[in-house]
Image: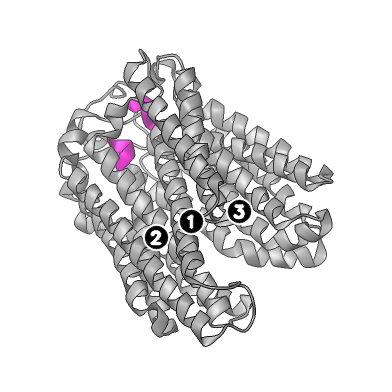
Amino acid sequence: MTANLSLSPASTTAGPDAARASGPTTLRSAWLALAGLSAVFLFEMLDNSVLNVALPTIGRELDASTTALQWITGSYAIVFGGLMIALSAAADRIGRRRVMLAGLALLAVASLATAFVGSVEQLIAVRAVMGVAAAMTTPGSLSLAFRLFDDDLLRVRAMTLISTVGLVGLAVGPTAGGLALAVAPWQVLLLVNAPIAVLAIVCIRLGIPADRAEDLHPAPIDVPGALSGTATVVLALVAPALLLDEGAGSWAPWTAVGAAVVCGGLFVLRQRRAAHPLLDLALVTRPLVSSGLAFKAAAGLAVAGLGYLVTLQLQLDWRWTPAQAALGLLPQVVVLIAGGAVISPLIRRIGLDRAAPLSAVVVVLGLAVYAVLGRTGYPAVAVALVLVAAGMRTVGVVAGNSVMRGLPADRTTIGAALVDTASELTTAVGIALCGTVIAAVFTGSITRIGWTAVQTAEFRTATSVAAGLLTALAGLLVLLGMLRARGGRADAEQAPARG
């Protein structure tokens, strides 16, 4: 372990958990727990990727409109993002393992209910319930993985393993889903979540001990804070969807933005005055926490925005078939999956404190390459995809670990929820920003075959402008993260976060 790694409070400082037995000393000794946590992350990644493949089939069989299809995916994302902080706060109080097991049981039931869906409204409701289950389980997978080990390098290796399993699901999901649809009804693609949930339940029950009372946050749940915080995130996620669906000239997205600002203000006011706030805002301002969230937000913005632009470019501008476009994205997929092998060696070499900002800078560099050179041909696009994927692969693991290190032992689950929420929000912002720029610059229907020379020029200008804005915004987030990280070492020494 490098000197930088040894600075972690969990490795060197006796904290609240010093009296208890140390955690596993190898990944192999914790294989059962890691299998269960990996299954949780696999569900989230696999579920989203296979459903997208099935949307045309679902639309035909359920006679769903384009808007209804958007809500099939949107209902899940909005409920998931909106409830993460509130449910994670509950998990820190009543037991992380307990909430995760309840969420997995809910996921299994909701998945089985898919077999009885007969209308698009019913499917949207089922997807919303799955979003609740995901909010109960996904942040817990990061929190429990962090709390499982005492050593930072083992924590990073565990998180890398878990995320790699999920990314494999993300990569193979579309192909597996397409093959399954050739021989089975679309419901099968969601029913597969049930056995994954059962596997996770068994492994977590056997591999992870129940939370001890002294490891839980003692304060009661701040219900008004939970309601206003949930409303803020939900409205913030709804607004970009409305912006893409109805355009910037509609009153609906701006009403949602205004309502989100009002609810956000009420949430902050409540947290400052509440005797037992849902989220102590002072925790978010800790250098390790705020820097980790900024780096994670930059990565989420970059990956979502670049993926959206490149997908449109390959299929609409260059007229590649969906199969060709999938091959065009292959460099990104390969790096996301194989990149896990270099994370631990990289951290050993440069340390945790340098890994996050360095990888975040690589993400911004990838966006800049696309903004400047993306229209010149596929080689430049491939370079941009590889750089963004390489940076995101590392920052996704290291930034989450940084947030965990910067929090008290009884707040790790809500810390994981903050990481996921930051990524969800910037993902929505990235896609909405790109869609808005294209809609403002491009004249006519973008999906119409046979663009004129003027329309082609407009699209390429729009993608360059959108990528440039993404680069600037991600760069500002990375700069903020770097400035906040300067105080991270002192913060880590003051707030040991082993739980």
Q: Residue at x 24, y 34 (%)?
A: 286
User: Could you give the CA–CA distance between mark 1 and mark 3, rounded to whole angstroms?
Assistant: 19 Å
Residue 498 position (above or below residue 448): above
Q: Quadrant of the C terminus?
A: top left
Mark 2 surroundings within 10 Å by alpha-carbon count, few (fewer than 14), some (14 through 19), many (20 or more): many
Q: Is residue 433 visible?
A: yes
Question: Which badge, 1 or 3, comes first in the chain's sequence?
Answer: 3
Q: Mark 2 vs mark 3: which is more N-terminal?
A: 3
Magenta stretch: give its range.
402-412
Instruction: Identify the main secondary structure in magenta.
Output: helix
Three-letter code for the amino acid on which mark 2 is drawn: Ala
Residue name at image x 15 percent, y 48 percent: 3
Residue at point 40%, 42% (across, down): 419
As drawn, the residue found furthest toward the bottom would be 453
User: Disc 1 or 2, which lies upstream in sequence?
Assistant: 2
Mark 2 = which residue? 302
Please name whichever residue, 462 or 277, is drawn nearer the observer in this view of the structure: 462
